[in-house]
Image (tube, rainbow, N blue to C red):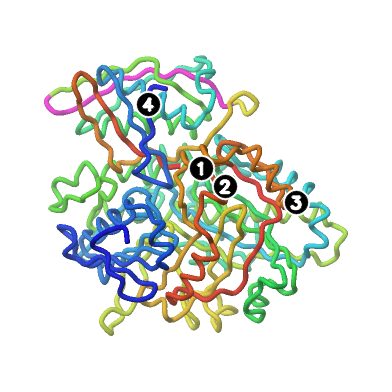
């Protein structure tokens, strides 16, 4: 598992800590963590539908919040389970942009084993920081 | 006692003074028995004192006996905000706007339902969409969705999904004012239009319950609430505004967070991002949130309609089958209400997150038929322990007429999953005469009764604090979970 659960933040919801070698890697691993909390066999999600986009944020944490919520949006709006394939985060004069490519498939009740539905990525205790050479993201998923 | 700042000021009231944390405008009060407060996780105390820093907060930041840690506000958190000088915060409402409970009474009895419990639960599981990715009973075109955002339950009734009693027996008559679809993003529309009439997952459920003879504590009030005879069957529906409300909250949390640095108030938790209530941004969120409140009312209405259809199919031969809404309460809202402050009536914006409005006898806002006894308050316990019906009391004035909403968690989801096995739990419950169907065994384990506080202790605490009066306990017979 590329992430760990943080136990002492919330009883009602799920708090996670994800580590990546870069912002790009952190975003990819965090998207996978989000899907893994919802779908027990998320590694079996077939990459048959592609969603690409560009989002922006005033800071890296807002960008992270926005990115993860995009995955939840597609799950509800289109009924698609998506995993990040590639992410490019760019900072320009204090403004952050992220171009992403997500791949996945429509929800299949007989195939996908669900844990819980994540309603939203929250800003509670949301932070991204660097420790040694690692980029670390912490956030709470509202379940 | 867990936190050094907490003072016991009454048998069931604990206070954290306003000098305990920098920026607190008012004290924080936790209403609970000593046993419950000792079971609360530390984050509750941190979160409720954060709430006390909100601009415009009046009186106290209150936490109900079922309080536990969430995000922004604790679950069970209540804040009364002066709308003129204060703010509105999506973190004080939650992403599942108007998550709530509806109770249906029936004239079915245990003896009629128990032999058919598997048939009924299976039919509910097939007929009521639940679980991740479930689509609603209806899918709404853009124009109709906008009408539903304004109309709530009234829209449902006009379109053949209910009757006048359903309108009368909901908070706000199932249709809160000042809902403006122009304040709702296209993303929220896309996310929610095809989910109306679905349970969702997590702690949402539909439960068949029985009011056993020994569990009716006030038979006259119980009769008024549709529990007419011993062993009456009731149905409890717990769900909210689904993806629509989640997206409304996400949109405005992002927007408020971006402009927070310019507001003069830096919240101790970014989830408490807020805007002045009377600013353009604050009003826009308020009107969008009201749309989500109405969609949640409609969601529970459509499920009630489907429940009635299914029960009429199964019990068609029983003449005069009655299935009626007793009441429908909201858990996650911010509403403009008038309360007494320093002896004068004042309009306040009451944020309730995982807490229930509980208006006392005589309130104009509750149905005329309930005015003599107070608002019905519906407390959904865990799927193993049972639920309660209470009614509002005058003594709850101190919490702006707010009380508990459920049991409250005592264990995190991860701890519960480590402790319980969903399939084994299902079997164990069946051996105890509770038949359950679920879309997720992992989700079932997270909702095990042992993950929650003792609901009997929670409601007893609420009653002893004056936050309502117990009418009856309802015991689970069957349940569907998302």
- In front: B329, or B53? B53
Question: At 33% across and 29% down in the image, what residue appears?
Answer: A67
**Lateral position of residue B262 relative to residue B188, left or right:** left
- Pointer 1 residue: B416
- Residue B267: horizontal and vertical position, in percent? 20, 51
Q: Is residue A98 magenta?
A: yes
Q: Which residues are magenta?
A: A93-107
Which chain letter goes with mark 3? B
Image disc number at residue B448? 2
Callouts 3 and 4 on one subunit: no
Where B309 sits versus A2, above or below? below
- Residue B52: horizontal and vertical position, in percent? 24, 61
- Pointer 4 residue: A3
Q: CA distance from mark 1 to mark 4?
A: 19 Å
Q: Secondary structure at mark 2?
A: loop
Of label 1 and label 3, which has the lower sequence position? 3
Where B169 sits versus B183, above or below? below
Q: Is residue B258 magenta?
A: no
Dividing the picture into quadrants, the one containing residue B13 is bottom left
Q: Secondary structure at mark 3?
A: helix
Which chain letter goes with mark 4? A
Mark closer to the observer (1, 4): 1
Q: CA distance from mark 1 to mark 3?
A: 33 Å
Image disc number at residue B31? none
- Pointer 3 residue: B310
Where B234 sits versus B425, above or below? below
Dividing the picture into quadrants, the one containing residue A97 is top left
Q: CA distance from mark 3 to mark 4?
A: 44 Å
- Residue B57: horizontal and vertical position, in percent? 24, 65
Mark closer to the observer (1, 3): 1
Mark closer to the observer (3, 2): 2
The C terminus of chain B - image quarter = top right
């Amino acid at each position: 598992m590329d992430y760990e659960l943080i136990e002492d933040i919330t009883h009602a919801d799920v708090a996670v800590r994800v580590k990546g070698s870069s912002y790009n890697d952190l975003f990819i691993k965090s998207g996978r963590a989000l899907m893994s909390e919802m779908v027990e066999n998320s590694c079996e999600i077939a990459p048959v539908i592609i969603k690409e986009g560009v989002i922006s944020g005033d800071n890296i944490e807002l960008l992270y919040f926005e990115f993860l919520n995009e995955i939840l949006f597609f799950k509800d709006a289109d009924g698609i389970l998506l995993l990040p394939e590639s992410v490019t985060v760019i900072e320009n004069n204090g403004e952050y942009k992220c171009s992403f490519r997500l791949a996945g498939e429509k929800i299949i009740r007989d195939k996908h084993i669900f844990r819980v539905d994540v309603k939203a990525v929250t800003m509670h205790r949301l932070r991204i920081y660097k420790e040694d050479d690692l980029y670390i993201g912490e956030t709470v998923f509202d379940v | 006692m867990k936190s050094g700042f907490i003072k016991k000021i009454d048998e069931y009231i604990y206070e954290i003074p306003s000098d305990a944390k920098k920026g607190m405008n008012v004290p924080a009060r936790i209403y609970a028995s000593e046993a419950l407060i000792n079971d609360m996780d530390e984050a509750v105390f941190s979160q409720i004192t954060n709430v006390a820093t909100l601009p415009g907060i009046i009186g106290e930041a209150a936490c109900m006996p079922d309080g536990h840690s969430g995000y922004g506000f604790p679950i069970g958190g209540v804040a009364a905000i002066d709308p003129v000088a204060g703010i509105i915060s999506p973190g004080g409402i939650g992403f599942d706007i108007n998550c709530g409970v509806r109770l249906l009474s029936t004239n079915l009895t245990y003896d009629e339902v128990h032999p058919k419990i598997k048939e009924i639960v299976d039919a509910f599981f097939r007929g009521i969409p639940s679980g991740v990715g479930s689509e609603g009973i209806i899918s709404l075109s853009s124009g109709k969705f906008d009408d539903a955002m304004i109309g709530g339950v009234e829209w449902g009734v006009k379109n053949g999904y209910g009757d006048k009693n359903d309108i009368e027996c909901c908070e706000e008559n199932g249709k809160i004012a000042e809902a403006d679809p122009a304040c709702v993003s296209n993303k929220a529309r896309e996310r929610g239009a095809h989910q109306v009439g679905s349970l969702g997952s997590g702690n949402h459920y539909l439960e068949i319950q029985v009011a056993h003879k020994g569990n009716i504590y006030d038979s006259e009030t119980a009769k008024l609430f549709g529990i007419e005879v011993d062993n009456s069957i009731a149905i409890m529906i717990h769900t909210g505004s689904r993806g629509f409300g989640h997206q409304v909250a996400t949109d405005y949390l992002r927007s408020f967070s971006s402009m927070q640095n310019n507001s003069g108030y830096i919240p101790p938790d970014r989830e408490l991002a807020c805007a002045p209530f009377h600013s353009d941004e604050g009003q826009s969120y308020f009107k969008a949130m009201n749309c989500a409140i109405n969609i949640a009312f409609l969601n529970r209405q459509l499920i009630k309609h489907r429940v009635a259809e299914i029960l009429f199919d199964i019990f068609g031969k029983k003449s005069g089958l009655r299935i009626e809404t007793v009441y429908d309460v909201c858990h996650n809202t911010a509403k403009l209400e008038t309360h007494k402050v320093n002896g004068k009536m004042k309009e306040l914006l009451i944020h309730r997150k995982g807490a229930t409005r509980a208006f006392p006898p005589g309130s104009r806002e509750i149905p005329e038929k309930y005015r003599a006894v107070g608002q019905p308050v519906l407390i959904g316990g865990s799927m193993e322990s049972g639920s309660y019906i209470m009614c509002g009391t005058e003594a709850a004035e101190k919490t702006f007429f707010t009380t508990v909403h459920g049991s409250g968690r005592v264990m995190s989801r991860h701890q519960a999953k480590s402790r319980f096995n969903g399939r084994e739990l299902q079997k164990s419950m069946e051996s105890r005469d509770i038949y359950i169907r679920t879309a997720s065994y992992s989700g079932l384990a997270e909702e095990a009764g042992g993950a929650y506080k003792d609901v009997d202790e929670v409601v007893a605490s609420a009653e002893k604090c004056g936050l309502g009066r117990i009418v009856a306990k309802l015991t689970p017979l069957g349940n569907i979970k998302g």
